[in-house]
Amino acid sequence: MTAQTAFETRSVSARRQNILDYVRDRGGAQIDELAGHFVTSRMTIHRDLQVLSERGVLRRVHGGVTTVPKAFSEGSTVQRSHRAVEAKKAIAALATTFVQDGEIIALDDSTTSRFLAERLTENLALTVVTNSMGTANLFTSNANVNLLLLGGRYNADFDAFFGTLCEQAATSLRVNTLFLSVAAIRGMTAYHQEQDIIKAKQALMNISDRRILLVDSTKFGVITLNRFSDLTEFDVVITDSGLEKDLEDTLRNAGINLEIAEIPVTRVNKANVTSEYLP
């Protein structure tokens, strides 16, 4: 890819993100309105809307587009840390079985990876590579962990570092196993709405011998903008028992190495309240 082609690709991606933001702010827009606002042709707007509608983030209507009810916004680390907590904890518990003493592991900025980090703060001797400030802080007092924090531009919303410095720092390393999460899964593809975060995750993918995706079942079928990777690029995909059975079968039949973490649920009986696992 030439520098000119790369620039044009980034320009198109940025315009489509701006179109999506514009429509979401207003709930809908007409093609002529978009062409005028973004100072481009109706044909270009038609192409952009076709791509956005195919990705499921906007809905085509006569003469324009509207938002879709299932459009997804991931939000800050604080917001994400309160979503699907039991599922993430179950996934993290299962993920620990893939960690060996003495390994070099990488953890991304996701809250699911942070739940995993909380379970790795004792016993195992590890080298941990991460771009997440919050995750790194969990290991600072652990003498058994050799901690490498990737620098770059700090993003307070995600409590992590991103940008060129972060990506370049990763290229000088090699890790045994990477644990990461994504914002959404549609079909056999993982998506995320933030390009900078995608680049950081991709940098970690490129330096890892084994890649393990941690993704709770609420993220399947959810809509967001930017493609990250095919599920086939992961050695293991760990989700929770909330995943629909037909979707589980589809993934397994497609060759995905799928692991299901059972979510503990609280049930009330006559004697007391007990914590059991879903059957």
Image (cartoon, rainbow, N blue to C red):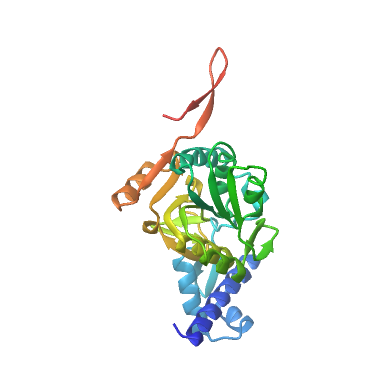
From this view, report whether residue 10 is shown above or below residue 174: below
Q: Which residue is nearer to you in this view: 227 or 234?
A: 234
**The residue positioned farthest toward the top in the image shown:** 271
Q: Which residue is nearer to you in this view: 233 or 70?
A: 233
Which quadrant of the view contains residue 26?
bottom right
Looking at the image, can residue 195 be seen?
no
Q: How many numbered discs? A: 0
From this view, report whether residue 73 is shown above or below residue 195: above
**The residue positioned farthest toward the right in the image shown:** 156
Q: Which residue is nearer to you in this view: 254 or 218?
A: 254
Look at 52% across and 75% down and name the residue there. 63
Residue 248 left/right relative to 213:
left
Look at 58% across and 37% down and name the residue there. 122
Residue 111 left/right relative to 159:
left
Please identify the quadrant where the N terminus is shown: bottom left
From this view, report whether residue 106 is shown above or below residue 170: above
Q: Position of residue 4 (x, y in %)?
A: 50, 87
Look at 57% across and 75% down and name the residue there. 14
Please identify the quadrant where the C terminus is shown: top left
Residue 54 left/right relative to 146:
left
Q: Position of residue 138 (x, y in %)?
A: 64, 45
Q: Position of residue 110 (x, y in %)?
A: 57, 52
Q: Position of residue 175 (x, y in %)?
A: 47, 56
Looking at the image, can residue 18 be seen?
yes
Look at 66% across and 47% down and name the residue there. 140
